[in-house]
Image (spheres, rainbow, N blue to C red):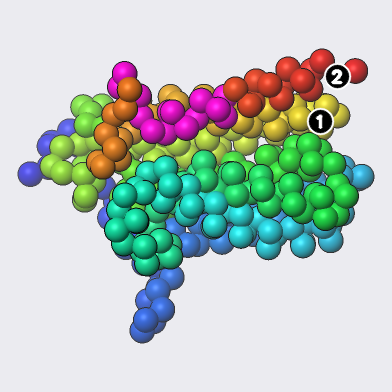
Amino acid sequence: MTPLLAIPFPVIDPVLVEIGPLAIRWYSLAYIFGLLIGWRYLISLARKVPGVMTPRDVDDFLLWATLGVILGGRFGYVTFYNLGHFLDHPLQIFAVWQGGMSFHGGLIGVIVATALFCRARSLEMLRVSDMLVLVAPIGLFLGRIANFINGELYGRVSDVAWAMVFPRGGPLPRHPSQLYEALGEGFLLFLVLYGVSKFGRGLKRPGLLTGLFFAGYGIARTVVEFFREPDAHLGFLYGGITMGQLLTVPFLLIGIYFMVRATRRP
């Protein structure tokens, strides 16, 4: 029975359209639209900030970024969150349509793709990455909305007025932590990066926006993890922290390093 103070979960079919064996899922659309919107925004930035990337570079980089996100995201999820299961069922590693992507792994994949692309095109990686992080929160926002639609990665049990009973989360109301992440890692981080780039001359100091993104994501993810239910097969780790918080520590340190480095450069 649903508690009286819980908001009913807006049940939305994870499959938008199904034609025979072909199914178009909201989760897939989040990745597709995140990449497409990011691509168009990046082209706009390339035209406004000459000398970093050309629009043609951006067009070519889209494929590299797509492979980095998908391969890295899946690799991260398999390695960091459920390695034992996938070692027992190796063929399920390739079943990406069933969900299971790690942001940390996806980011590592994009970093590797960016490094290889910049080397192939003789581009300055820090300046390129400063432009890429302006785009990244768009994909994060859409991805978290897709998590909410799927009713996955829900929050901990709560009695707040906006708590929801998720279809796969048991009978008790929980924090809609996916929406918290969409707000923090997506919308707010986008605004901060945009503001620093436009009014704080962030693009004039290579590495500043990159560091701000890493640190900003690290802070947002660490905070939201206090409201998000840990993965059932992992639970809480050392001292009550979660795997998401543990993986975020290097991001915070990298972010601080790049920001300090950028502000010290003449």
Between 50 and 11, the one nearer to me in the picture: 50
Q: Estimate the x, y position of residue 220 in percent, counting from the top left.
A: 50, 28
Q: Which element type, helix, strand or loop, lies under badge 2? A: loop
Q: Main secondary structure of the magenta part?
A: helix
Q: In the image, 135: left or right of 19?
A: right
**Residue stretch in magenta:** 239-252
Q: Residue at x 52, y 45 (%)?
A: 105
Q: Residue at x 70, y 56 (%)?
A: 39
The amino acid marked with disc number 1 is: Pro
Q: Which element type, helix, strand or loop, lies under badge 1? A: loop
Q: Are marks 1 and 2 in contact (CB under 8 Å)?
A: yes
Work out how far the residue at label 1 is from the one at label 2, CA to CA, in angstroms.
9 Å
Q: Dot 2: within a 10 Å radius of its alpha carbon, few (fewer than 14), some, or many (20 or more) residues?
A: few
Decide if residue 26 is in sight here.
no
Between 169 and 149, the one nearer to me in the picture: 169
User: Going from the N terminus, do you reach mark 1 or mark 2 first?
Assistant: 1
Identify the image quadrant of the N terminus.
top left
Q: Is residue 173 above or below residue 74?
A: above
Between 9 and 234, the one nearer to me in the picture: 234
Task: Find disc 1 in the rendering and name its residue.
Answer: 206
The amino acid marked with disc number 2 is: Arg
Number of the label disc, if any, that sits on residue 265 = 2
Q: Estimate the x, y position of residue 126 in percent, counting from the top left.
A: 78, 36
